[in-house]
């Protein structure tokens, strides 16, 4: 079957197997390997992307179901060479170790900040409760999201305050 959807602002049309999952469509058909595939049980959250602005586990969505929708992946967060504040926050607060969970964490945090620009620690922890991190203990991930909330202009704000 043929599917047409928007990925990171570009409309794409591809021939796919009807059973193909969105995570495999992104990684294998479009070579967007920033979206990770971490389990067979829909538990880990590493595959999280935004569909029409809402975080979804892309291993639970058929590529065909994404037809006509807007999908945003970690590759689509950077704007004109500037990291998204959430990405910058993960750098500033050392919010990752192995990095496997990071794309899903970042996309979930982006969706949270889009609907709630000033979340509490509790709200952040609730938002990322569908994501498993085996390395960090979550403390620095929460700090990274708070950094992004406090620096909505991202790295530009950091550079300005340092000068
Ligand atoms: S790959 Fe683990 S929840 Fe999707
Ligand atoms: S940084 Fe390794 S799983 Fe989260």
Image: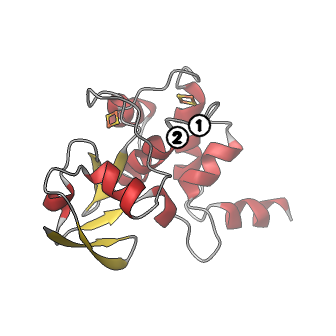
Whole-percent x, y for residue 22 in the image? 27, 53
How far apart, in angstroms, are the residues tagged by discs 1 and 2? 5 Å
Residue 115 seen in render: no
Up-down relation of residue 161 to residue 126 (above or below) = below
Residue plotted at (35% across, 45% down): 48
Contact check, label 1 and label 2, Cβ < 8 Å: yes
Q: Are there few (<14), some (14-19), or many (20+) residues within 10 Å of tag 2?
A: many
Residue plotted at (43% across, 46% down): 109
Residue plotted at (28% across, 47% down): 58
Residue plotted at (49% across, 46% down): 103
Task: Confirm or reject: label 2 Cβ below 8 Å from ligand 2.
Answer: yes
Q: Is residue 79 left or right of residue 81?
A: left
Residue nearest the viewer, comparing 111 with 30: 30
Residue 153, quarter of picture: bottom right
Q: Is residue 35 left or right of residue 135?
A: left
Q: Is residue 104 left or right of residue 139?
A: left
Task: Confirm or reject: label 1 Cβ below 8 Å from ligand 2.
Answer: yes
Up-down relation of residue 59 to residue 74 (above or below) = above
Residue 60 seen in render: yes
Element marked by disc 2 = helix
Residue nearest the viewer, comparing 57 with 141: 57
| Quadrant of the snapshot with the N terminus | bottom left
The figure's colour scheme reads: secondary structure
Which residue is the site of mark 2?
102
* Rendered image: mark on residue 99: 1
Whole-percent x, y for residue 133 in the image? 48, 26
* Picture quarter with ligand 2: top right
Up-down relation of residue 28 to residue 92 (above or below) = below
């Amino acid at each position: 079957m043929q599917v047409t959807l928007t990925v990171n602002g570009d409309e794409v049309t591809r021939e796919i197997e009807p059973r193909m999952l969105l995570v495999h469509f992104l990684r294998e058909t479009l070579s967007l390997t920033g979206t990770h595939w971490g389990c067979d049980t829909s538990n880990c959250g590493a595959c999280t992307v935004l569909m029409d602005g809402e975080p979804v586990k892309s291993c639970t969505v058929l590529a065909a179901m994404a037809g006509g929708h807007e999908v945003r992946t970690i590759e689509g967060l950077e704007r004109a060479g500037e990291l998204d504040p959430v990405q910058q926050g993960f750098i500033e607060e050392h919010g990752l170790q192995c990095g496997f969970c990071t794309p899903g964490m970042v996309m979930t945090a982006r969706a949270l900040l889009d609907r709630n620009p000033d979340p509490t620690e509790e709200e952040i922890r609730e938002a990322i409760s569908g994501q498993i991190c085996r390395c960090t203990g979550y403390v620095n991930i929460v700090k990274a999201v708070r950094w992004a909330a406090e620096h909505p202009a991202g790295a530009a704000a950091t550079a300005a305050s340092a000068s």
